[in-house]
Amino acid sequence: MFGCSINGSLNVAEFSKPMPWIGIYIAAASLACAVAMAVDAVAAFRYRRLWFPSRFFALNATSLTIIAVAVKLSVDLNTPMPRRQDQLAKLSSSVLICTVMGNLMPSLGAMENKELLSNMIALAILVITSIVNICMQLGTGVIYTYRREHAFVMLLMLLLLMMLSFSAAVVPTTKCYLEMKYCKKHELALKESSSHSRETVFDKLKEDLMKYGMMAHTGNPQFVVGRSVTCAASGALCLLSAMTLVQAMLRSYLMPGRFEFCNGESDYKWSSMVILIAQNIAVGVGTIAPAFRWFIAIKFKCPKRGNKSYKDEFKLEKHWIQCFIEIKECPLGLHIPSRHCRKLTHDAKRVVLEMLTGIQVGIVLGSKVVRLISILFMSRILLFCDLCCELRKKLKLNISVSTNDLDSSLRLEGSVSKPPDLSRYVLHLEGEEELVHTMMRNNCDATECWIKMGKKNQPKHLIQLLEETPSRLFGGVMSFDSDAVPPLDSAEPPNNWALPIVTLASLGLAIPNIDPHARKRLLQGVREGLTYVNLVEERLCAKQELVNTRKAASIVFLEVDLYHKWLDVDLHKLSLQGNSMRDVLEALGGTAKNVFVEFKALPTTGCLMESPSMWPVKVLAAYSMYRISETLLLDCKGSDCDMSSRIFEKLARMISDIIAACLTNLEHVMFTECCCSGIEERKESVRFAALLLGRTVKVMNILNQRELPYLDSEQLASIDEWRASGDLRKALLAKSFTDESELSSLSPGDLYLSIQDSQV
């Protein structure tokens, strides 16, 4: 029973009953950290980013909360921990703090300045609280074994916290410096792109993407932090903390006689062992990334094994202390009336900043000492690995000579084109000059790998749709909506690319007497085409007046794709009712007109009628259906309206032409992705552009066979600009007299207007 006992004393025993479940909570948080660090490690190995960017396990509010739960044993001051596993769990909790700090360091580069400051303050509070509480536990006897290990781990904890804090102070400076270098390289890339002509658009885009990919990768703030000397040193410290835990566990279990543990049982009971196992897993998994960063930094730093010249090893680069110098020279901005107080405040600020500068110099030089010791220790091992690689190459060469394949291998090597020299596009800081060629060699083929990956997922149904409706012009852009159709209102909504495609696809499903496989192929092509059409509209047509129209297209197509319905009209049922082509068009056009008339009759639509772009989604879809169905009805006059196959072919050609016209903007989309993103997102933007190039290479080859109107890049992104282009009208008119397929894509109304334009 809770509360007081029979004799009036507090029933303390009941308070410890939930402790095993709290232990499970701690173990679960530790495993969550382990999973996040493992996912980052797997992704780094998979994509060959051996500097291990922190994507899933980054410094933010969520990770700090989970870490605080996982290291609860370090701040637990009064729970008795008598057994071996209890004391080891205390030590593993302390080591876990070192491990997570080593894993979090690259994520410093991915944060804005205010976010970086707040997260570092929160992490510092957590670490300092843990250190103070561990010292209290050492004093009170809660921690009575592994005292030297705890003292050593606390020292590593403090050093890691200082490395993280002072590395975070450098991030804004390095970002500004890299952004300036990127702007200069961007101008160089533009000049080279305009001066060099390539055979195809694909070759030009590929070369540009490789340049921007190199700039984005080497200028990635996470990579800059990950290859820094402090990050390499933090990896060494994390490795030392993990080794401290390993040796403590080995000594404890292999030499039990050297340790004396108290009798009794912890309040955590059986959950202490669960915590120990979970935190050992987290430490083991979490040590992978810092250890690899340390090893890769050493490998980068000594490309010539056995080189004993280290005269420039202790040179201090300016960017490490630039931020402190700038702050020291700037005024505080505080309103202090007294001149004497202002002087004291300014002098105090200078003293503090000089002290911080000294600490920063000490941290950087100390990190270089750690790196130098590591190089001296590992250089012979690396030299041995190099000798093994050379022997392996010689053995392969001897085998090639013995089998008379040397000539063929040389011919093969001569036929393979060498990768371009992109060293001038490597963004590097002061002191990283010797890493330029190493970074270029390790990352020159990254963009090409993304392009190859994209080629494996090309839109085959879209390609089939474009190939089945070959055309050198874009007649469907003009003919889907005729100016001869009377408008329902004086104000008309602006056109976008997606809504006409969706409306035409809806009509294609409603046409009677059409092969179901042909309908399915058309719908599959439209589905894949809309993926890229929506991308073009998101990147290049992000006007407020088109938001509702784009939303209408996405909502209507969802119903058409999943249920074969257009605004609750069953298209499949309509096609099976035995109606003629004219009946189907009149039914859909009449339904659309009724929707608009009902909307216009509502008393609350007065202000909306003045701004057609703000019409409801349903009304925009109905207006599009009305105009397109009426345009097709104009084409039915004077012809056999039951020729469903001819109308279906005409619809497919219109859809193909509109999609093709929209996708001529893909080159501009890729260029925009590379150039217009921030420094933190630039790497992912280039990756996305490379994947997009690989996926659309066949589409772009098909589009290269078509003739574009004389429009600039902004006009090419707007379907209304295409329709207003007099060049396109005249080209279609000239072509229509010599090509019956182009003539069939023009409605009588559009042909009449084109003739009128040509006469004028």
Image (spheres, rainbow, N blue to C red):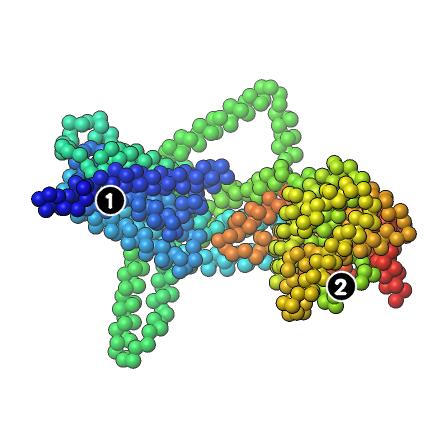
* Three-letter amino acid code of the residue under disc 2: Leu
- In the shown orientation, is residue 662 left or right of residue 23? right
Q: Nearer the viewer, residue 140 or 653?
A: 653
User: Which of the numbered marks, if any, corresponds to residue 488?
Assistant: 2
Q: Position of residue 272 (x, y in %)?
A: 25, 35
Residue at point 22%, 26% (across, down): 254
> How would you rate the neighbour count of disc 1 (Cα within 10 Å): few for under 14, some for 14-19, many for 20 or more?
many
Give the numbered dot on residue 449. none
Asked if residue 721 is positioned above or below residue 54 in the image, the reply reads below
**Relative image position of residue 207 (x, y in whole percent):** 62, 47
Q: Is residue 758 above or below residue 73?
A: below
Residue 74's label in the rendered image is 1
Q: How many residues crowd around disc 2 within 10 Å: few (fewer than 14), some, or many (20 or more)?
A: few
Q: Is residue 243 visible?
A: no
Counting residues from the start of the chain, the first of labels 2 and 1 encountered is: 1
Query: Would residue 217 be found to the left or right of residue 131 on screen?
Result: right
Task: Tell me the residue at 15%/29% (across/down).
Answer: 258
Residue 314 is situated, as x and y percent measured from the top left of the image, at: 34, 50
Query: Closer to the observer: label 2 or label 1?
Result: 2
Q: Quadrant of residue 715?
A: bottom right
